[in-house]
Amino acid sequence: MGVYTEYHPKWYRRHVSTWWWMGKWNYLKFIVRELTSLAVAWTVLLMLMLLNSLREGEGSYRDFLEVMRSPGLIALNLLALLLTLFHSITWFNLAPKALAVRVGGRRVPALMIALPHFLAWIVVSAVMAWLILRR
């Protein structure tokens, strides 16, 4: 008969560094993409503050624009734009891995899944730019 104890023996667990994600580009890209969601959240918050200032009237809107002219916020918003672009591009590149579309028993090529996402993004961006910049 075996000998049994009331506790489980301590398992061997290999030490994993806090910086494990720095070891490979794919890991680093994953962590950076996850962190870029903070830039997306900042952009959403900024848009909500803009809509609120518009709701409160012209004076509030002008005050909002004045605050947004500060060099620190301009730099922060440029950084948020770059991080949001990185987030969007990596998100659309993940679409073929998440959508396993099969036609006639064969998997649709990744480009045929990702390309419509990018084209829709370009079309929506162009329409928005046209609406904002026309005068």
Image: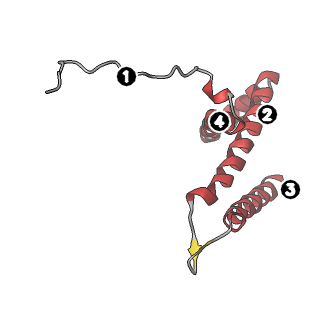
Front of the two marks 1 and 3: 1
Front of the two marks 2 and 1: 1
Which residue is located at x 69 percent, y 47 percent? 90
Which residue is located at x 67 percent, y 54 percent? 92
Q: How far apart are the two marked residues, 2 and 1, measured between alpha carbons?
A: 48 Å
Q: Report x, y in % for residue 3.
A: 17, 21
Q: Quadrant of residue 26?
A: top right
Provide the residue designation for mark 1.
11
Q: Which mark is residue 27?
A: 4
Provide the residue designation for mark 2.
78
Sequence-first tag of 2 and 3: 2
Q: Quadrant of residue 35?
A: top right
Indicate the amino acid at tag 3.
Arg
Q: Secondary structure at mark 4?
A: helix
Provide the residue designation for mark 3.
135
Indicate the amino acid at tag 4.
Tyr
